[in-house]
């Protein structure tokens, strides 16, 4: 009896599934036009964004140098990365330090300054947005820091510090492994108010003013209470978008250390995961090994995005 | 009901934009607007009509404001879309704008010789009841200091570009040049003239790539964004979620497999290697889709009822209504294409981009310090200028940029 019941149940279950599929197919057929519109983008997107991720995961398990066909080596690349490649461990440490500092600090800075800017009169706000946003779109303007932090006495920072008598001899900001990381972090923070910052500025302007008025009546006493109880909950979508942008820029640091600290840098002090990937991929053509690095990096980015969206769920409730 | 409730002359605004001047005839739940020649320009069906202005600045609603000659404003809340009967002239002769009631009263009072007391202005205005003035001052100070720190490197770059050679290596170094000169820029032109490939070629390459990359991206991404935003079809939502995840793929993570894919498609050392990935940039689709969500569905439904096909709806109804988003997509695309040096996929010198050529000049070492600064200024000024010119439109688009989980 019980088997009969379970059979009929499973049969019903599969019937339901089949019906759902058929229904979905019918629906899809009726909306052919939608797929037609999506097709050009979807094909290109698949070829240049999805396929690379998949092949990168595949090549991560092979030895591949473009000239010979890829040879399957199992998890050897990953074992080498973790157990033998000391430079990779340095790179992971550096990337971690950069990501943990510039990611959250850049994110919070973007949010706070967008909030402060929002209180300014309109004309001043427009100017302030340009000043804060400009560094992130200024192309390779960060190369100017190589003059500011230059290691000889003509370097701007060195000359100021020597003028005031803090130091006697010029410091090698971009060559001494002790100073490279702080300098890089400052430069990356300078560039960190990008698309996420713009999204915050726009988000603040879009909040319904009547909510604030209701807040005064309900006894919101100061700006911090207003921020936590009214502003943050209505900014959640922007906060998530800003977080995605911050993660991307925090983990993909590559151009700045290469331009400022040299490539390779002294003692690999400015080596990041992406410069390491670049080194193996485009200088040594060990594509399999580089793909393994890319796969790991990608995994870490997805995990941190999930973690942040879970954390944002709890904000302002 | 066919009796006229309101019959009045005035100007018709749709979504805050002036469209036509003429006469309005309102009935119980529909209205017609006729222009000066007596042609029917618009026919509306609405839920209700009220004399209130509630269209938010830049917002997208299916509300229509009618400004009448008697200074009244009528807001029509439409329950179906707008039917367009006539093609409307762009240069419709419009009446001079009406002065506000307060201005009129002031004018009359002045004519009578009365003196008007102006409201006192406070030096520091407390704009919100729950803001402390000390906090405001602290925030302004902090903003000012940080803004200076943010702007300093850029100002320093511009200053260095204007310094003559002897000032570049002066000790102690200065921020502002004492004898500003454009020598570095003219030197740059001389160096460019000596390059192996004529410099105009690099410029042409960049302009070509930027223009076609942006154009193709705009069309392809908008088409996809349109169906993702306005139709519910199997797989659509999943696809968009994948695109949101793809916002995190940087050029470096996908760079190596992309190289392999491009070489197997025979695209290495052609412009396609730059153009095709740019067409599919996730940020453009994302912005477009989020902005299109706010378009009233009634607009599209009305066009469907009138028998317009999907492509016509897309081209003549949706696209004209999302111009701020166009601009944002164009700017993001131009920024990334303008700054791409493409050194890994393009090998022929004659196909390389302007930024690549500039970087070669910059790599020239100490002797080219001044020229390098000039290059920095040239490269950074293009995206910053574009941003300054289009800031308000970009911010309007960014307002819908959030990710709903």
Image (tube, coloured by chain):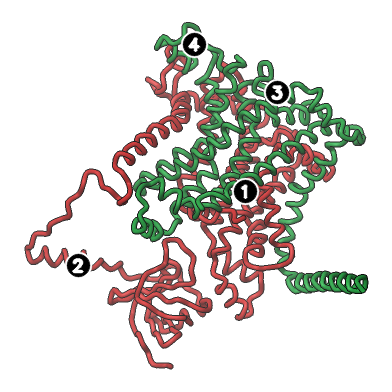
Chain colours: A green, B red
Letter of the chain that mark 3 sits on in the rendering: A
Tell me the mark number nearer the camera, choosing from 3 and 2.
3
Q: Is residue B244 above or below residue A92?
A: below
Residue at the limit of the structure toward the front, as seen here: A1
Q: Secondary structure at mark 3?
A: helix
Q: Are marks 3 and 2 in contact (CB under 8 Å)?
A: no
Local crowd size for mark 2, using a 10 Å CA cut-off: few (<14), some (14–19), many (≥20): few
| Mark linked to residue A310 | 1
Residue at image point 42% right, 61% down: B57
Give the spatial CA distance, label 4 vs label 1.
49 Å
> In the rendered view, does B344 fall on the left or right side of A16?
left
Q: Earlier in the sequence, mark 3 or mark 1?
A: 3
Task: Have a look at marks 4 and 1 and say if they share a chain.
Answer: yes
- Return the chain for callout 4: A
Give the spatial CA distance, label 2 vs label 4. 67 Å
What residue is shown with label 2? B104
Q: Residue at x 56, y 59 (%)?
A: B291
Q: Position of residue A189 (x, y in %)?
A: 53, 32
- Please give the chain letter of the residue carrying mark 2: B
Residue B213 rendering spot, x and y as whole percentages = 65, 48
Residue under label 3: A90
Q: Which quadrant of the view contains residue A305? A: top right
């Amino acid at each position: 009896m019980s088997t009969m019941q379970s059979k009929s149940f499973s049969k019903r279950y599969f019937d339901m599934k089949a019906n759902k599929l058929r229904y979905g197919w019918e629906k899809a057929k009726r909306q052919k036009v939608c797929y037609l519109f999506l097709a050009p983008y979807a094909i290109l997107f698949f070829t240049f964004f999805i396929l690379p991720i998949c092949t990168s995961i595949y090549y991560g398990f092979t030895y591949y140098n473009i000239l010979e066909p890829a040879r399957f080596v199992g998890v050897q690349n990953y074992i080498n990365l973790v157990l033998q490649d000391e430079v990779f461990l340095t790179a992971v440490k550096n990337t971690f330090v950069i990501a943990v500092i510039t990611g959250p600090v850049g994110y919070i800075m973007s949010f706070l300054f967008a909030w402060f800017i929002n209180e300014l009169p309109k004309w001043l706000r427009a100017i302030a947005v340009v000043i804060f946003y400009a560094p992130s779109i200024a192309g390779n303007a960060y190369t100017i820091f190589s003059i500011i932090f230059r290691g000889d006495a003509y370097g701007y920072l060195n000359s100021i510090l020597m003028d005031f008598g803090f130091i006697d001899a010029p410091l090698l900001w971009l060559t001494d492994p002790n100073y490279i990381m702080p300098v890089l972090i400052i430069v990356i923070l300078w560039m960190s108010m990008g698309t996420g910052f713009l999204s915050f500025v726009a988000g603040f302007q879009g909040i319904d003013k009547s909510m604030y008025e209701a807040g005064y009546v309900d006894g919101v006493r100061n700006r911090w209470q207003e921020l936590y109880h009214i502003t943050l909950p209505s900014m959640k979508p922007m906060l998530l978008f800003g977080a995605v942008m911050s993660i991307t820029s925090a983990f993909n640091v590559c151009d700045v250390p290469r331009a400022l600290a040299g490539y390779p840098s002294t003692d690999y002090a400015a080596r990041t995961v992406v410069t390491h990937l670049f080194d193996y991929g485009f200088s040594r053509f060990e594509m399999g090994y580089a793909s393994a690095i890319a796969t790991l990096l990608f995994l870490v980015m997805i995990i941190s995005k999930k973690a942040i969206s879970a954390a944002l769920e709890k904000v302002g409730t | 009901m066919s009796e006229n409730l309101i019959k009045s002359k005035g100007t018709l605004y749709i979504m805050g934009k002036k469209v036509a001047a003429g006469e309005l005839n309102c009935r119980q739940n529909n209205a017609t607007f006729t222009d000066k020649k007596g042609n029917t320009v618009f026919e509306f069906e609405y839920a209700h009509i009220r004399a209130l202005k509630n269209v938010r600045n830049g917002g997208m609603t299916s509300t229509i404001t009618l400004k009448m000659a008697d200074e009244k404003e009528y807001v029509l809340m439409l329950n179906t879309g707008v039917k367009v009967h006539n093609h409307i002239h762009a240069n419709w002769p419009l009446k001079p704008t009406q002065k506000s009631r307060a201005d009129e009263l002031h004018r009359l009072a002045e004519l009578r010789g009365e003196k008007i007391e102006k409201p006192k202005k406070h030096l520091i205005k407390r704009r919100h009841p729950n803001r402390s003035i000390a906090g405001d001052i602290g925030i302004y100070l902090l903003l000012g200091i940080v803004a200076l720190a943010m702007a300093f490197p850029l100002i320093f770059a511009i200053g260095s570009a204007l310094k003559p050679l002897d000032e570049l290596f002066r000790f102690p170094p200065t921020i502002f040049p004492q004898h500003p000169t454009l020598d570095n820029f003219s030197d740059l032109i001389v160096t460019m003239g000596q390059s192996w490939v004529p410099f105009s070629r690099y410029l042409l390459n960049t302009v070509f790539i930027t223009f076609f990359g942006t154009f193709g991206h705009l069309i392809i991404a908008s088409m996809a964004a349109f169906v993702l935003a306005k139709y519910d079809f199997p797989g659509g939502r999943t696809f968009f979620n994948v695109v949101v995840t793809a916002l995190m793929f940087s050029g470096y993570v996908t760079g190596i497999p992309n190289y392999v894919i491009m070489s197997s498609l025979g695209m290495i050392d052609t412009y396609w290697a730059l153009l095709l990935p740019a067409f599919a940039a996730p940020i453009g689709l994302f912005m477009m889709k989020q902005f299109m969500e706010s378009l009233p569905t009634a607009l599209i439904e009305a066009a469907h009822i009138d028998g317009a096909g999907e492509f016509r709806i897309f081209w003549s109804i949706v696209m004209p209504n999302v111009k701020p988003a166009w601009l944002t997509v164009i700017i993001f695309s131009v920024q990334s294409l303008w700054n791409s040096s493409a050194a890994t996929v393009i090998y022929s010198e004659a196909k390389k981009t302007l930024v690549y050529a500039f970087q070669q000049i910059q790599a020239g070492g100490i002797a080219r310090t001044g020229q390098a600064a000039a290059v920095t200024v040239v490269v950074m000024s293009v995206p910053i200028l574009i941003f300054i010119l289009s800031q308000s439109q970009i911010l309007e688009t960014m307002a819908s940029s959030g990710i709903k989980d």
